[in-house]
Image (cartoon, rainbow, N blue to C red):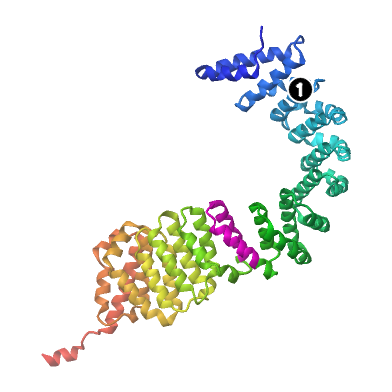
Amino acid sequence: MFEKTLSDLVKGIRSNKRREAEFVSKCIAEIKDELSSKDKSHAIKATAVLKLAYLQMLGYDMQWASFYIVEVMSSPGFAQKRLGYLGASVSFNDETEVVLLCTNMFKKDFQSPNPYEVGLAVNCLANICTVDLARDLVADVVSLMNSNRAYVRKKAVLVMYKIFLKFPDALRPSFPKLKEKLEDRDSSAISCAVNVICELARKNPQNYLSLAPCFFNLLKVTSNNWMLIKIVKLLGALCPLEPRLGKKLVEPLTNLITTTPAKSLLYEAIHTVSVGMTPHLSIVQLSMEKLKGFVEDEDQNLKYLGLLAMGNFMKVHPRVVAEHKSMILKCLNDEDITIRHRALDLVSGMVSKKNLMEICRILMEHVSTSEGSFRHDLVEKIVEVCSANGYASMTNFEWYIATLCKLARMPGVCNGHHLRHQLMDVIIRVRVVRAYGVRMMVDLLRDAEMFSQSSRDPTAAEVMYAAAWLVGEFSSLLEEGQHHAVLSALLSPRVTNLPEHVQSVYLHNALKVYVSASKSHPPPANGSDAGGA
């Protein structure tokens, strides 16, 4: 009987698409025979494990073969051992009972004179590491960090991260040895040590502040872009904890930002400036110039990253970002909605008393041409920048009321609640524009198109709620002859098409307007009527 190879298995599955489950079941039965037979060679059993690994990737369970996988892992031949470790890596997990049987096997293979066998064991440990394995093997892995082979040292350094995750108690006693690897004679081992420490520092950078001088020296001497990215990222996390570090980094990062052609490294350097070096204006301005190139690039990913980094600078240096206002507002026309949203997020930081009306005019133009959720976000942004900090940037409230009314009349604007709140807030709080606001509300109540839109769209009806309430509350400000027209609008039979809570406001405020009209036009005295008769 000829055993199937992996190639035979793949071809068989492709040729039996309609009977795949039946074919795979037959193959698994054959694999079980190959693994359980005492007459089969290590090579046959290793091929069986390889086929199981392929089936595992297709979704078939191979937990039942765990013991046989351990048996193949202990094969004397490197080729068979490699397939055994592969099977363990793709199928073992924390609940696999036979993992405990691997401890002595790992210890044995760690001592192998063949560095590639040691590498196999270390790779597998990284994939199947459990609490027990981490506790029992940490001393052996630490000893591997002293190997005279860089291939073994760098793998041992990397697997320490997985050991720390599973067995945190190992970090404190083994960290000095890990720190030594930052000065290893091989650059790849240094890179691995940097990578592990960077990952550890993500959770608590404070614990690694003492390593700042070492990383600073590495920053100045290494030319490995991948290592530089990690170093810059770690130093960026340390800068907020040690302000003096930011000052020291100005020169090397300036040189890096100026000279590197690697976009990934350039972005990490700029990001570090944005999170920990914002007091240093010179490098901030240099970073903004580089970000301008990102935003103007045709690559959408770079454009997005540029806007994202500008958002970090906006929190501390809004004026520096505002210098690029036209470029940012231009991004509102981008086809990619994520870029439009990022540009919109930057708008609020660029607003001042001088440019508020101009920015709102540009946003209004986009409201009329945009669709969907982005139109909703544009209206929210207009309201946000105008009302920010208690209307600190607002110099013309009549203009703002007119703008809100214009937005309310735009079909498809689903921000009625925001517009209602703003109209009521401004007209109630700002006495000098109250008369103007009441006139605008009367126009809304008498606007047939607006009424028709409110009948179809409940959110637009919220604006009519504000108009009716404000006209009733400040009915004393109605001009001569307006009372009758307002009452006609409030008591129109078509009001029944509006939501019930809006109808109730119409009715209540119609009474207020009627009382105000009665006070303005009191009935003639009875004595005068009699005299006339």
SS class of the residue under badge 1? helix
Q: Nearer the viewer, residue 249 or 467?
A: 249
Residue 312 sits inside the magenta stretch: yes
Q: Is residue 65 left or right of residue 134?
A: left
Name the residue located 73 percent from the left edge and 52 percent from the top edge: 228
Badge 1: few (under 14), some or many (20 or more) residues near its Cα, within 10 Å? few
- The vertical placement of 447 against 373, above or below, is below
Q: Quadrant of residue 85?
A: top right
Image quadrant where residue 439 sits: bottom left
Q: Is residue 513 above or below residue 135?
A: below
Picture coordinates of residue 348 (x, y %)? 53, 67
> Is residue 158 positioned above or below 465 on the image?
above
Query: In the image, residue 420 lies at what x, y percent?
Result: 41, 67
**Which is nearer the eye, 254 or 506?**
254
Residue 156 in picture, x, y percent from top left: 82, 39
Q: Which residues are magenta?
A: 285-313
* Furthest residue toward left: 533
Tell me, yes or no, whether the highlighted magenta stretch contains residue 2.
no
Nearer to the camera, 346 or 323: 323
The answer, for residue 207, to whether it is visible in the render is: no
Position of 26 compared to 464: left or right? right
Q: Can you name the residue that lies furthest to the top here? A: 1
Residue at x 28% of width, y 73% of height: 486
Q: Is residue 230 visible?
A: yes
- The one nearer the camera, 524 or 204, is 204
Q: Is residue 243 left or right of residue 366?
A: right
Residue carrying label 1: 79
What type of secondary structure mainly makes up the magenta span?
A: helix
**What quarter of the picture does the N terminus occupy?**
top right
> What type is the residue that disc 1 sits on?
Ala
For the image shown, how many numbered marks are present on the structure? 1
